[in-house]
Amino acid sequence: MKISLFAVGRMKSGPEKELADRYVERFSKSGPALGLEFAGVTEVPESRAQSAAERKREEGERLRQHVSGGALILLDERGRNITSQDFADRIAAFRDGGRRSLVVAIGGPDGHDQSLRETADLVLSFGAQTWPHQMVRIMLGEQLYRAATILSGHPYHRS
């Protein structure tokens, strides 16, 4: 299954980008043996529409173009807070259920459009607090790598 990241906003060069890239690279190397292929990151600029609702709608339309029948996980502070083991199990279930792709999406400052939230396979939260885009990218990269280590039985994740 191909796994890609979709992000509204760009990650600027610096230590945060380096750390996010390091975790994604680790996932890229450990995933193929598990049937998980990293398919890249798509960054789109924030919408410049007047209202928050219109911005979310425009950003959601861009995201829909990248999903094309695959599984969709939205990162949202109002989503479900699950364990790393549960996250790994969800990814494995998508893969084992015949899904060919998974898109994990980080929304813009206004969040995700309600229509996307209603159709997503999972709306996931990294906690009730609001996190900067750069931190979310780092945490997501780390959790993808952690999921691969959980699924392979590697001791990186100890419970």
Image (cartoon, helix red, strand yellow):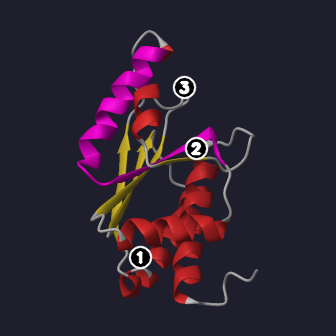
Q: Are marks 3 and 1 in contact (CB under 8 Å)?
A: no
Residue at the spot of label 2:
133
Callout 1 secondary element? helix
Which quadrant holds the N terminus?
Answer: bottom left
Tell me how far mark 1 sits from mark 2, CA to CA.
Answer: 21 Å
Q: Image point 27% across, 46% down: which residue?
A: 66
Quadrant in the rendering for residue 100: bottom left
Which residue position holds label 3?
Answer: 110
Q: Which residue is mark 1?
A: 28
Residue at figure coordinates x 48%, y 32% from the top left: 112
- Tell me whether the residue at label 1 lies in contact with that at label 2, contact meaning CB atoms closer than 8 angstroms: no
**CB atoms at circles 2 and 3 under 8 Å apart?**
no
- Reply above or below: 156 against 117: below
- For the residues labelled 3 and 1, the Cα–Cα distance comes to 30 Å
Instruction: Say if residue 125 shows up in the picture.
Output: yes
70 part of magenta stretch: yes
- Quick check: 65 left or right of 48? left
Inspect the image, locate mark 1, and give the three-letter code of the amino acid beneath it.
Answer: Ser
Q: Is residue 18 visible?
A: no
Instruction: Mark 1 or mark 2: name the one nearer the start of the chain.
Output: 1
For the point 62% across and 59% down, the residue is 139
Q: Residue 78, located in which quarter of the rendered image?
A: top right
Residue situated in front as seen by the camera: 145 or 69 = 69
Q: Check disc 3 and report its element: helix, strand or loop.
A: loop
Residue 99 lies in the magenta stretch: no
Residue 91 screen position, x and y as percent = 46, 67
Q: Amino acid at mark 2?
A: His
Q: Is residue 13 left or right of residue 58?
A: right
Asked which secondary structure carries label 2, the reply is helix
Identify which residue is drawn at 40% across, 28% down: 115
